[in-house]
Amino acid sequence: MKLTVEQVRHVAKLARLELKGEDEAKLQGDLSRILESFEALSAVDTGDVPPTARVFPAQAVRPDEVRGELGVEKALANAPQKHGTSFAVPKFLD
Amino acid sequence: MDALDGPIEELQALLASGDVSAVEVTKAAIDRVSKRDGKVRAFLKVDEAGALAAAAASDARRAKKEARGPLDGIPLALKDNLLTLGLETTAGSRILKGFQPLEDATCVRLLREAGAVILGKTNLDEFGMGSSTENSAFHVSRNPYSLAHTPGGSSGGSAAAVAARMVFGALGTDTGGSIRQPAAFCNVVGLKPTYGRVSRRGVVAYASSLDQVGPLARTVREAALLYSAIAKHDPGDATSSDRAVADPLAELYRGVEGLRVGLVTEALTPELAPRLRAAGQAFEKLGATVSEVALPHTPHAIATYYLVATAEASSNLGRYDGVRFGHRAADVKTLPELYARSRSEGFGPEVQRRIMLGTFALSAGYYEAWYGKAQKVRTLIVRDFEKAFASVDVLLLPTSPVPPFKLGENLADPLQMYLVDAMTLPCSLAGLPGLSIPDGFTSDGLPLGLQLISKAFDEATLLRAAWAYEHEHPYGEKAPVFE
């Protein structure tokens, strides 16, 4: 399947990536070739085959108890920018 | 120091008798890294102070007759996508440069509790995405057997550090072959345990239904030692298995008399068949019964894996947003700009390519045809193995369809690089344990690996079969040459 430049831009927007012009062209070519080579998958008969999301069943859910709280200082320790006891982000509401 | 080149068992005897101390061994290992790693570049960071402190603590325990077992005082390395408290963890990515974990990964904690000395963090393809370490944001690692060649990936730094005798063993992670392939390329043993056998807590996520931690070591026995230390149920990982762990050392030397071994038909290509048949004959000589077994959906493993893994990655890597940790773009005005620019500045080209592929496969209008289809074919791959294991105990196939390739050789063409994973992906998609052992060299002296796969949670049989083969074919003993 060949991707158009518009499709590449749409996917980049969904993925929150900011592509430069030359990256767009490169990705358009790479992804198109990769998807074309994956097209053989569509010929596999999967009529009533269920999908596999995980190979073994999940373990029992553990009790919903609060434990091992991080604390504000640790939680903010790796924040590139903070404001008091909060993560700082650009203003997004007027 | 000679003790660095011998088996762990020998070093333990020297430590126990007091002929050598853990601090001396650790200093020798640090010295060896300084002599050899300028060429190999296996490490991203060597933690000299932390390693020496751990070694001193080990010596103190031993003096009080409180040594903790076979790994106490033994220098090991960790792939840099395993969180280490007090030691920067980057996952080979610019986006995590400077990241200081708030806790140890469970597997790291278990190794520390066993008394191991953590020498440092090893290089990898960014987030584990690659087969050569060439996707590391920091530098490329080299194969100790030929510096012009790749050590494999993504755990290439761990494999190279073990092969170059800078450490006795290392942990890696394997999502689609990232322990087994570099182990094969570097002439060491690499074990990917069953999915869920080792906790993923504190492992930087790539594809959560596939990621698994495992050991790289110089011998099967030493791989079993490391595996035993980290294979444990962890309530901190909901996919961690609570099944009892069979002690792989208990029956390691029992041999393979009566074991049913299957050669994977799909791997019997003109190029690969001679070596694989030779391995089969070797097992036959050891008393195993050998047959050929088909895994008919193997040709679809690459497409299946690269759709499933990238879809999961596109979701997992959503956490890198420039807000809570990691790289943040400067001078942005809006929140969407902050997200997009931080990510595009922080992620390398292959990671962005995989995020794009995965996002596409999950996007409206394409989900069913791509991601949904891949999940169904994954079921067929799982069933292939179920059928195969009805008649055999262990499957044999090459670890890699190609010997170690030259650095730069596959870099321009991502699809070419994906093809390198063809032999390791089916096992990963089925969540089964797989292991690579040294299987000789090409005429140019480049290492080759033999892959063994067993039923889920049957690592003990896998290691027993591998030990029997290794015992007769000790290719791993041939160390790389450093002047």
Image (tube, grey):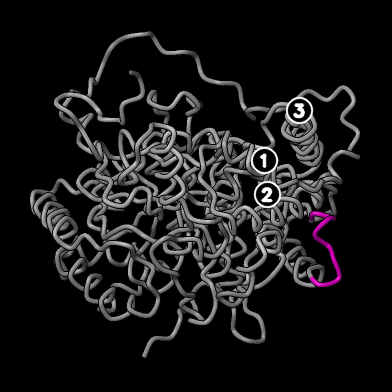
Mark 1 element type: helix
Range drawn in magenta = B264-271
Image quarter (top left, top right, bottom left or bottom right) of the N terminus of chain B: bottom left
Q: Which mark is residue B425?
A: 2
Question: B29 or A18: nearer the eye?
Answer: A18
**Relative to B201, does residue B20 appear above or below in the rendering?**
below
Host chain of mark 1: B
Q: Is residue B423 left or right of residue B186?
A: right
What's the amino acid at mark 3?
Gly
Image-based side of B353 in relation to B158, left or right: right
- Chain bearing tag 2 is B
The x and y percentages for residue B130 are 56, 57
Q: Where is mark 1, residue-wise? A: B429
Q: Nearer the viewer, residue B304 or B135?
A: B135
Farthest bottom residue in view: B483
Kindly give the residue lying farthest to the top in the view shown: A64
**Residue type, numbered disc 1:** Leu
* Mark in front: 1 vs 3: 3
Q: Which residue corresponds to the image point at 30% horizontal and 72% vertical from the top-left? A: B4
**Residue B322 at x, y percent in the picture:** 35, 39
Q: Are marks 1 and 2 in contact (CB under 8 Å)?
A: yes
**Same chain shared by disc 1 and disc 2:** yes
Residue B294: give x, y in percent of width and height. Answer: 85, 48
The residue tagged 3 is: B365
Q: Confirm whether residue B298 shows in the render.
A: no
